[in-house]
Structures are given as structure tokens and as C-alpha cells.
Amino acid sequence: MMPDEDARTTPLDAPPDTTTEMPQPDEGAAEATPKGGSPRELAASPDRKPPPAEATAPGISLRDINAYYGDNHAIKGVSLEYAPNQVTAMIGPSGCGKSTLVRCINRMHEEIPGAHAEGSIMLDDLDINAKDVDVVAVRRAIGMVFQKPNPFPTMSIFDNVAAGLKLAGMRGVDVRERVERSLIGAGLWEEVKDRLSEPGVGLSGGQQQRLCIARTIAVEPDVILMDEPCSALDPIATLRIEDLIQDLKERYTIVIVTHNMQQAARVADTTAFMLLGELVEHAPTEKIFSNPGDTRTEEYVTGKFG
Amino acid sequence: MEAGSLTSRATVRGGRSIHERSPRSRAIDPLLKWFLSGLAALILVLIAFFFIRLFIEAKPAFDKFGYIGFVFDNSWVPSQQLYGALPLVVGTIITSAIALLLGVPVAIATALYITELAPNRVKAPLTVTVELLAAVPSVVYGLWGIAVLAPKLQPAEQWFSDTFSFLPLVGGQVSIPNYFIAGLILAIMIIPIVSAISREVMSTVPGDHKEAALALGATRWEMIKIAVLPYSRAGISGAAMLGLGRAIGETIAVTIVIGNAADIGSTIFSQGYTLAAVIANEFGEAASDPIHRAALIAAGLVLFVLTLIVNAIARYYVNRASRPASVPKGMAG
Amino acid sequence: MSAVAQRSLRPVGPRRRRSDAIARGVVLAFTIVAIVPLVAILYWLVKEGLGAWSKSFFTTDPTGRFLGDPGGIRSAILGTIEMVALASIIAVPAGVGVALYLVEYGKLSRFANTVRYFVDVMTGVPSVVFGLFVYIVLVVTKVAGTFAAWKGAVALALLMLPVVIRSAEVVLNLVPNSLREAALALGAPRWKVIFRIVLPTALPGIVTGSLLAVARAAGETAPLLFTAAFVLGSSADLSQRMNSLPLQIFNDVGQAQDRLVQRAWGAALTLVVLVLLLTLIARLIQRRSKLSP
């Protein structure tokens, strides 16, 4: 078993018409890496799975979100719909607010001293940004995977996955069964099933991130937020996670923040482009990359800035 | 897209609906926050209480002798109910001055050696060794000082006193316990802390400054003179002040080796007394005499205020030096 | 810098080379001077103290007799252990609690910064002043008797408190924020984040800091002088006077009898061994921990 290496992904944000990596042949070859090509080509590619026919997860509706860091108005009046069981990518240049917006969804933004967010966040028919809603309960329904894998260092692989159950205080759950199911769902079971008691931090970067994903889905949220989940991983690990996302959308609504346009084109059903705290455009991925409605979007996806 | 109630679906899938957490478990967070804030506030209350109680108990002595009188009268004679603390203050100053004069250069030298000159393998063991000096309890320093150091140094002290008797504060008979031995022991005791802080400061000197000097062809020592020392000046001053604070407050080691004579000795080799030593030494007898007790507590108060001032100055200097302040993490609660 | 630049255009002359060598020699010499006392103290401790060690030294109490058998130091050892243990029970949880407040809740608020400042102030207070304070507040007022071991423990706890708070704060700050975020995002209430994630991760560092504080408290004399005072016998009664190693040494130091002075050396060696052991264990734990400051 070749360990994934912890290198950063090679920058695939190339200007158009530059093909980077050759797609690897499928049969019996070394580990595959994500398909290269321009975002436009990738967006049109049929590799992406269609969303399931019947919705099994709720959608999220953001209505007029304004978020602040102290006096700094970071998110300006954003309204956006995340359709159920779809993968939505949030793209935009550094500092455009995509991470901030996503952190508002699971109410993590307000954990920063001096930060607050206004507006409605509708999880189906419930406004989870309302004052009387229990923040802790919201986070059990909306999970988050972070940029840098962060397994708990004092815990084994098994305990890491079970951590969500213990921390969220879920009782009456068959822990072993849930851990196994989550590890299978995260595509990590085969690799770790014989060493569940080993420390979680002993895994490679890509495995650690899948462990964090297993930990997140163990509490069975409705929605999974991913904040640049692959940017600290090598291409092989990245592909595995991108494939995993395609599987996960069967059961969850997924929002993924990414600075990598090719990644957005590969995995997302719809893509939202943000700039300077505002939502510029939100459309099906093919349209964003081939025929964007706004000039700013076009300039960004063709690499004129960002 | 499925319409219908999210709450019911969230209940079925996650096991908990969005609104649901028992009131008891929701109460734990605010309770914990208030409890811990209370603990922290207790620190402030404690220190204020400290100061106030010390002052109240010391007041009888200040009332009888006046604030200035207490500190500056040169007559500490418990048998006659006279409590002018000048001999104590002078003794504190003399011993601390000797401690700084002898200890700070040595501490700076060790810090310099460890950060700039020592071979890599030696750095860690050397650091640990210097820090071990701090682990020795002060009563053990006192024991060693009076049983070993003072008798052994007496011939040398006598020779020095005879040879350099023209110098002020030198000359005459050398007593075994004296200001100098106390100062010397204090010097040894402050080396670890002055060295540790100086080391920290010196290790933050930007590599570019040092490399620039070396690239110009400076010798190692010249590089230290040009790049390391000027940059570290503020921090080293702070370190020295912290050492001073430590020297002023040291009680047990001093009282064992200074002779506990409530006069202003004529030379550095005479017996003497300090503010801290008098408290430890006379507390037994003072138990029955309220004025004596008040006087000792007043001495303690003066000591306290002195160390507060010195440490505040030290902190100012150390913060001015580029010592990375500990920036708290954790998230709002 | 121009003076240096001018000088450096010429090759390094013998004069510069010599002053470099002299300066480095002086620095090295001073460094050795710093270590000499440590070596000397350890040498004398072993030389004079080892001779005092015997079975009866550790198993009998001091008799207080000047002629005849002076006895051993059993009560001193027991007393130190009892009082330091009590002081730790008070100071470590309280100190970690305040550190938790500073790192997890207060952060950079004005109140938190004020608390930090005063904790800093506390570290500079001479230990005799702590003893005085407890004397005034607890002994003079005759709260549950006059001198008592538990009052001595309180004075020691006051001494340990700022040390524990400072070191615990450093360690808690070293816990990566990403762990807190991960736990919060899973839907953990803040108190669970603290007790299930932050504290377990920080535990080795907190233990190290506490052990160092304990080592410091074990060696202190002044705070005990007028709180626990001095007594010859062993007891487990914390409401009465209690002996301790530093006090026993202090008492024996000035005595004329050689045997008593030797007992002081023996007790000093015992105390130093105890302190060094604690320090060593603390450093070992620190080295094995994943977070090192």
C-alpha cells in the first residue's frame, strides 16, 4: 500500500488551453490522479455523476446574509440556494468571502471573537440562524471538513470516528456498526480495518482527511460543508476524495469551497462565483465555465485575474 | 425536491432535532464560563486583599514612626522599640548591587555562549545545567554559603580588605557572615533567570543582522558586538531587573549568611541585615509584641512595594524587546 | 556600519583576531564560572550529607535534644510531603481553571489581560510576603487555631498558583485551534470541547508545569516559618504545626553542634534529591509530549 504523500496539489489553475497531466490509463496502472484540462472541458465532461432522482437530504437557502468581522463588512447581502443532494462549488479569488460564507452556514463564523452574521439560513423550513436556535444542534445537522486534516491526536482511528458520536452526545447508537459504516462510506475501511486502535495521526495526509470525512458522516448530518478539503493533499489523494464526493451526494447535500477551478468543474453540479464579499453568479457548472452570464465571472474563469 | 418538515427528517436521520437538547445540558456551558471567570476574578480580589491587609497590619508602625521615618531612620533596635529601617534598606541595596554586579555579567556571558558560541551538542546540556541552579532551594544555598563558602573565602576577603583598604567600603576586619557573601550567593541565585531571559532575547535576533555583519568580514565577537548585543539591550535590561527583583526578595539564603546585625556595616565585609532577612529572623520574638510585629509587617510591605516597582520596570523592558507575547487562541464562548 | 566596512576592506589583522579570541575566552570562562557553584554545591551535599544518611535518619523524628541523640528527620520528610500535596490539590486545579478561562474564554479581552498582568505580578512577589499574608489573615485571626499545617499549605499554594497558571496557559495555547474547530463543527458544546479534546491534548504539558511548581514549593522555607511553624514530631494532623524539610534545615543550620549541622546536610541532600527527581520527571514527560513549547 503506497502511502499518499503530503505534497500540495500541483497548481492546476492554468490559463486555458494548457493541458497539464495526461489522464492515466485505468486498468492495473499506478494510482490515478485527477483529470487535467481546462475547466470548460472538464465541466462538459460526463465523468460527474448526476444527482440522485429523489432527494434524501434537505437543501439550504441563504437569504440576505451579511457577515462581519468586527466592523469589517465581509459578506454583503448574499442570497443563494443549495439544491438538495447536489454538490455546489464556491469559487472566487482569495479573500472573496467564500470560506466566510460557508462558515456562516454551520454557525462557525460567530466563534471568532468580534464576528457575527445576519440573515436567514433556511434548512428546509427552519431558520437555523435565528436567535433561539441551539447552535450546537445546528452543527450536528451540518458537518464540516476542513482544509488541513485535523484528527484528534490523543485518539485511535476508531475513537476518532466515534468522537463525533460522543461529542454530540448521541446515545443508543451501535458505535461499532456506525464507525464501520462511516469508514466504508469514506472509502477508508479496507485500509484501516485491521488497525482501528492505532493513533489517527499515524495515517498519511489523504487517509487522515478521509478519516475526518468518516468522522463527519458518523453523526449522520444532512449537509456536508467542505472548506478546500484537498488543498493540503497530493493529486492521488485528491482524486480519491473527489470520487468520494460523488458517492456522498447520494445521501447528503454538499457545499465545497475550492480555489481550484478544475476541481469545481470536475465535481460540482452547480457553481457559485463570489467576489469581494458578494455573490456574482450562481449557475450550473457547465454554464459558469462555458458561457457565464457576468463579465467578472468570465474574467475569473478564463484566468484574467485571481 | 422534497418539501415537508425538515425537523422531522433531522430527527429521524441525526437522532436529534434542531431544537432539542435537554435544558440541563444546555446550562452547563454558561455555568462553566461563570465559574472559570469567577476563579480568574478571584486572582484580582486576592491581590487587592493582600495589599490592603498588609497595609492595615503595618499601619501601627507607620503611625508611630511616620512613613519617611520608618524607612529612613537609622535605628533598628527592637529591645528599645525603635524601628527605623534604614539599615535594612541599605543592606538590601548593598547585597542586591553586589548580586547584580557579579551575577549579571556572568549570566549574560552564559546566554551569549549558549546562543552564539557553543557547539550544537553542548547547547542543550549546558542550558539544563544552568537551569538546575534554579532548582536548588534557597535554604540549601544558605547552608552551603555559611558552612562552606563563607569560611573558605574569608582569607581571600581579608587579603582583599587589607590590600585595597583605600577603597571606600573596604578595609578592617572581615566577618564570616557579611554583605559580600550574601551578595555573592544572591548573584549565583539570579544567574538562571537572567540567563534564561537573555537567552530568549538573543535567540530572536534576526539572522539577517548577524549574517550581514559576518558577510562584511567581522569576527564572531565583532558580530556579537554589532548585531546581537545592541538588539538585545532592552531585553537584557529587563532580565537584569527581574534578577534584581529576585535578589531583593530573597529571604532565607540571605538571613543565613549575612549575620543579621541591624547596623549599617562600614564595609562590604561587615555583617548586615536586609528587609527580607529581618522578617524571617525576628518573627519568633515579635509574636508577643504588637509594635514589633507591625514593624516587621511594615518591612514586608516596603519589600512588596519595592519588588512590585522593580518587576514593573523589568516587564516594561522585556516587553519592549522583541519577545513574542503569548497570543491566546481558542474561540469565543 | 561604515566604520566596519572600512575595517573589513583590510584582511583581519592580528589585533582583531586577538581581541576576538580574548573575548570568546572571557565568555567561556564566565560560563564555566556559572557552573562551578552548582558542581560545588552538589559535591558538598554528597560529601557532607551522605554521611548523615542512615536507616534511623529517615525513620526517627528529631528529638530536639542538644546533647545525646539528635534524632532523624522523619517528621520533616512527612511534613513536606503532606503540605506540598495539600498545596498542589489547591493550586493545580485552581491554576488550570484560571488558565482555561484565559485561553478559552477571556482571550484578549481587557479583563483577561488584567488578570494576566496580575498573575505576572504574583510571580514576582517574594515568598516571605506570601507567608506574611497568610499569617495575617489566618494565623493572627486564630482561624481554627494558630499555626497549622494547612495554613502552611495555603501559603505554598499561593506561591504555586501563578507558576501553574503561566505554564498551563502556554500549553493550552499550543493546542492547535483546528482541533477545537473540528470538535465544535461536530456539534460539541464548548465544555465538551474543553474537557474531551483540549485538556487531554494539553495534559502532559500541564503535568510538567505542575510538577515544576511542586518542586519549587517543596524547597520553600519562608512561607512556612509563620504558618506551619516548627515542631519535632510527625503527625498526619493538618490542623496542628508541622515540620518540613526546609524548616528542619533552617533550624539546624546555625547550631554549634557538628552533629546537628551534619543533620542539616543530610536533610539538604534529601531535599535536593526530591526536587531534582521531580524536575527530572517533569522534563521527561515534556520530552515525550507531542506539544513542546
Image (tube, coloured by chain):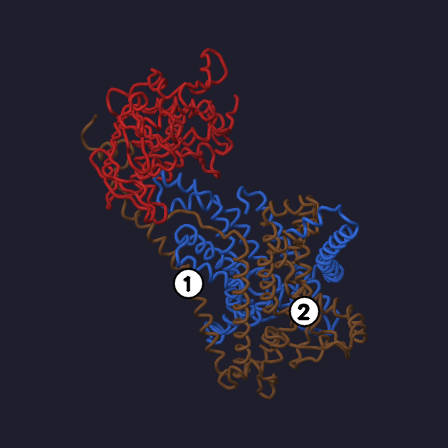
Crowd tier of the residue under label 1, counting other residues whose Cα lies within 10 Å: few below 14, some 14–19, many 20 or above: some
Q: Name the quadrant containing residue A127.
A: top left
From the rendered image, report the letter of the chain displayed in red.
A
Q: Where residue B118 appears, x then y in whole percent?
A: 70, 48
Residue C263 visible? The answer is no
Count of numbered circles in the view: 2
What's the amino acid at mark 1? Answer: Leu
Q: Where residue B295 appears, x then y in whole percent?
A: 54, 80
From the rendered image, report the letter of the chain displayed in brown.
B
In the picture as drawn, the residue positioned furthest to the left comes out as B4
Crowd tier of the residue under label 2, counting other residues whose Cα lies within 10 Å: few below 14, some 14–19, many 20 or above: many
Q: Chain of mark 2?
A: B
Q: Nearer the viewer, mark 2 or mark 1?
A: 2
Classify A6 as above or below A33.
below
Q: Chain of mark 1?
A: B
Which sits in the foreground, C24 or B56?
C24
User: Do circles 2 and 1 both sit on a common chain?
Assistant: yes
Which residue sits at x=40%, y=34%?
A146
Tell me which numbered mark, 2 or 1, is placed earlier along the sequence.
1
What's the amino acid at mark 2? Answer: Ile
Left or right of A226 in this view: A22: right
Q: Name the quadrant containing residue B216.
A: top right
Q: What residue sits right under mark 2 in the picture? A: B98
Q: What residue sits right under mark 1 in the picture? A: B42
From the rendered image, report the letter of the chain displayed in blue.
C
Query: What is the C-alpha distance between the residues marked 2 and 1?
Result: 38 Å
Q: Where residue B2 appears, x then y in whole percent?
A: 20, 27
Classify C11 as above or below C214.
above
Quadrant holding the C terminus of chain A? top left
Which residue sits at x=46%, y=28%?
A233
Classify C273 as above or below A252.
below
Which sits in the foreground, C196 or C292?
C292
